[in-house]
Amino acid sequence: MVKYSPLTTEHITKIKEIVHYENVFQDAETLLHYGHDYTEDLNFPPQIVVKPINKEQIAALLKYCNENKIPVTPRGAGTGLSGGSLPIYGGIALSLEKMNRIVAIDKDNLQATVEPGVINENLRIAVEAEGLFYPPDPASKGSCFMGGNVAHRSGGPKCVKYGTTKDYILNLEIVLPSGAIIWTGADTLKNSTGYNLTQLMIGSEGTLAIVTKIVLRLIPKPQHDLLLWAAFENAEQACAVVPKIFHQGLVPSALEFMERKAVELSVAKHKMSFDFGMEQAYLLIEVDGNDITQLHKEIESIYNILESNGCNNILLAEDATTKEKLWKIRRSIGEVVKSHGIYKEEDTVVKRANLPQLYNKVKSLEQLFGFESICYGHAGDGNLHVNILQGTMTDAAWKNDLPKVITTIFETCKALGGTISGEHGIGLVQKQYMPLVMSKIHFQLMRGIKNTFDPNGILNPGKIFPENY
Ligand code: LAC
Ligand code: ZN
């Protein structure tokens, strides 16, 4: 394990000089807040929290920390689900929250430039006012930062049609631990110029450099959408129908799966009336585009596919209020499951058509070990969020068996052409499982990259790489 010395008074005085005292926080409440994110109940308070206001401050800070081997853990809004922003070795929590400007919206080129502290939803609203669209929409879109989306290569329901964060980032301004500031690529739609450092940064979870500006590609805003809610008596059938929709040449703009329990918890939390069928599982299916007649045709085709594949309760959301309600049910699931007791969330992903096998495996393990699982997620992407709840397992069994359960689930993902995270990242809580999907050679290559960017290992230490690899 890497050892870092605690910050001295002298270090802290110098850091206050570099980023100005009003951007440095040491009070107990702030430290506690920046010691946790949305990942389970973990807490690792930093020694200080620094909220720089520009790239020059970040460059000077990193240079100083690099020279003094001070750990720096970058942080967006703290909505991550893999413990990526937890300062596990103390040191500095580097919050990008003050760098929250939408720098430019370039209508001629369908691009925007933002700072990392811009909230995903604020970007969406700003570009929609110009008739443009930024599709990646994590469940936490109302609070998560674009910098965090880049760090985790985030997804969301719309990604089944439009792709994830990685498909929208053209260029990044980054600060290296040496204090150097560079752009990773160019603001162009095409770029065939050497290694793709932009994509290397996306998903690197703040372990290589600090992103200070993001140039994004936008698309024209689709004018219409239609939403179907489909209830299935059999959850496996709900998973199995998903590839059939794509076979017919249809590409929904969202194709979400929810187990009954997930929906029940969400509905109860919001004290909603619910009359959309009490079956075993549901699909929420959206199509979007500019030609409403065409969309109705697509919905009709989907309706027919659902009906001939075991779905006996299909609702077309007639108005904006119903659509909003259905989306609220779906988007709240992650949060409501959290408040339901002791749990561990996995972000499994397999080839889309293999989803029924993955689902069945999770349920068979449930029987075997006595936990309760609540599954939901982006079925169109083969991305199933599996929440493992302690259920009837004793504390000892939970501690002892949970890693076995997770290992088996992840081995199943691998066997089904998948991997251990689709959109939440590895961070702290999944790193021990990385050897299931990556070999020593992978780690050697990744370690070489890490050492090139961050030779002193100051940036987000203790993440992604399993111990002793
Ligand atoms: C969701 C988050 C948890 O899909 O990824 O709700
Ligand atoms: Zn998700």
Image: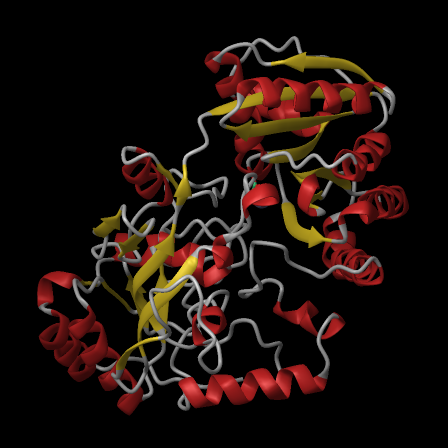
Residue 400 vs residue 385: left or right?
A: right
- The chosen color scheme is secondary structure
One can see residue 384 in this view: no
Q: How many marks?
A: 0
Residue 455 placement (x, y as % from top left): 41, 90
Q: Quadrant of ligand 2?
A: top right
One can see residue 82 in this view: yes
Residue 401 placement (x, y as % from top left): 79, 57
Q: Nearer the viewer, residue 3 or 309?
A: 309
401 to 312, vertically: above or below: below
Image quadrant containing the N terminus: bottom right
Q: Nearer the viewer, residue 389 or 76?
A: 76
264 to 183, vertically: above or below: above
Image quadrant containing the C terminus: bottom right
Residue 157 placement (x, y as % from top left): 57, 39
Q: Residue at x 43, y 63 (%)?
A: 44
Q: Residue at x 31, y 52 (%)?
A: 109
Residue 374 placement (x, y as % from top left): 71, 37
Q: Nearer the viewer, residue 302 or 444?
A: 302
Q: Quadrant of residue 54?
A: bottom left
Q: Residue at x 66, y 82 (%)?
A: 442
Q: Quadrant of residue 415?
A: bottom right
Q: Quadrant of residue 190?
A: bottom left
Q: Residue at x 29, y 49 (%)?
A: 118
Q: Nearer the viewer, residue 113 or 99?
A: 113
